[in-house]
Image (spheres, rainbow, N blue to C red):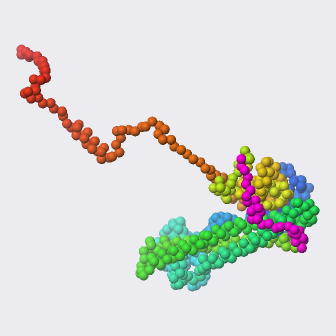
Amino acid sequence: MPPTQAESVIKSIIREIGQECAAHGEVVSETLVAFMVKAVVLDPSNGFNVDRTLTKSDVQKLVKLCMARLLDTKNPSLDTIKMQVYFDINYTSREEFLQEHHRVLESRLGSVCREITDNRACAREELESLYRKIVSYVLLRSGLGSPTDIKIVREATAALQSVFPQAELGTFLTLSKKDKERQLKELTMIVTGIRLFNRDCGKGGEGIDDLPAILQEAIPATTHHVDSQLQIAQNWAHRYTAILEKATDNPLVAIDLQPYKLKEALYNVRQYEVFLQIILSDIITSAQEVEIMIKQLGAQLEQLKMTVKSKIAVPTSQVFPIFVALASLWNSFQDETVLISVLSNLITHLEQFLGTHELFPKKILQDFLEEVTVKTDICRIKEHLEERVHSEDFQNLEWFFPETTANFDKLLIQYQGFCGYTFATTDGLLLPGNPSIGILKYKEKYYTFNSRNAAYSFAENPEIYIDIIKEKAQKNAELIQLLQLHRHFDILIPYSQMRDVNKLYIKPITKNESSTQTDTHILPPTIVRSYEWNEWELRRKAIKMANLRQKITHSVQTDLSHMRRENCSQYFQSTVG
């Protein structure tokens, strides 16, 4: 089947499933349906062959299976997949979010900017109208108040007139379009800086919110909310893990647990925990940035006060750069405010995917928890803290340890840091790995384990356990993203993972003790005795040589000495004809 035809068939299947779900009162997005279609096809128990063209009966079967999964609202697995799809659509990294935010702002200001740069005003009324548009543009771009508020417009106009009087509009109109756009941005920054300075002095600042104070209040509140949600998720995870461990040792308990899908519930809270950790990391970064910016803001305002203090006139070359720096800082405060708001909204929406945990009867959970010790992840790590893999036991495998690897904490651990051996041998139980035991490098991938015995067993034949984990993920599609198994399933790589592909190649920086020794005079000496380092000595020798070249050697004989040397001479008698 040609690619275009296959794509058309898939779209029609997705559309049909969406319509059927809507008819049953369940509204689902096309992205969720597409993910579910791929998950159903991947499950080997459903009998689909991805290399074979789907027949009509295959399509009907696919629609039926997808419908059954999408309408099973009491299944934690569906909630986990919904959570993953929602997070993938709505979350972006800090850098990408700020870039997109700035791009959206620029696009919104595009029409206002074009009205100014394309203007050919000549008459007085047209020039006044153009000036008002520039004031509106400055307000919209700076985000400091509404251009419909008279008090704010008057304040912004006064600030603009102090640096760009209306008389200069003629010069402005002669500029090229790019120069006009550049000057508008510069004017916005300067006017913003002036208004911020006036606000700090108590002489203006109408419509300007105290963003540093708002952020100082909002960030701790958001962090506290994330911490509380993390605590709830971890408590659930620890209890579910304890019960599932008990079921591993007792087959009768495992049979009793089957109707409650506790393992799927564990995957749900672990995925929720992972997403909260990602969001919390962004919030902590924002808190650090805000702390630095508040110090910079205070320093800039103090510098500006010292510059203009008791002075009638101040050179623009001194104050304009400070105004621009102030405006740039305030723009960063605005970015952080929007980012914290988006992250808070994301946290709120993720909570709706935890509803299935409330469906579990508390009494039954308490019964299962009897005579069971609920251990936290930290407690599990401490239990095996003294254990260590002996790398000399493995000739062909490489192990990394905290004391010998500089970037130990930055290595990208497989399976989200969970123990792959335990997951494979206990039919999907998630236990956190302990990196201090040793990190195994196998085929450029890094693995951690919850005990030394698990590490040794996995290292004997890693391929067996890797294949078991892959087969388990085919049956539970939510594990593909939870355990970061996208390299095994290319058709289910989410956009967020495609963006971070470069992070998959972090190489460990190992540290080893080494020593070196340099032999003394291993080569024959090559000292040039005539070498002279002193420049003045070289000049003295040069002058001496120059003087000698101008000298002539003379010999002198006296009356007493001329007889001591034999002399001979020869002459020819000339004949004169």
In the rendered structure, which segment of residues is drawn in magenta? 363-392
Instruction: Tell which of 7 and 37 is nearer to you.
Output: 37
Tally of numbered tags: 0
Is 202 included in the stretch rendered in magenta?
no
Q: Is residue 311 above or below residue 74?
A: below
Image side of residue 296 versus residue 32, left or right:
left
Q: Nearer the viewer, residue 157 or 142?
A: 142
Q: Is residue 135 above or below residue 505?
A: below
Q: Position of residue 444 (x, y in %)?
A: 71, 50
Which quadrant of the view contains residue 100? bottom right
Give the answer, above or below, for where 139 lies relative to 508: below
Q: Is residue 521 visible?
A: yes
Tell me if 565 is positioned left or right of 172 in this view: left
Q: Position of residue 381 (x, y in %)?
A: 75, 62
Horizontal and vertical percent for residue 240?
83, 66
Q: Residue furthest left?
A: 577
For the point 53% across and 76% down, which residue is it? 298
- Magenta stretch contains residue 383: yes
Q: Residue at x 85, y 62 (%)?
A: 245
Residue 105, quarter of the rendered image: bottom right
- Give the residue at the far front of this rendering: 386
Q: Residue 549 at x, y = what percent?
A: 23, 37
Residue at 67% across, 75% down:
220
Examine the rendering and report whether any part of residue 331 can be seen.
no
Determine the residue positioned at 62% across, 68% down. 102
Front residue of 529 and 324? 529
Task: Name the image quarter holding the C terminus.
Answer: top left
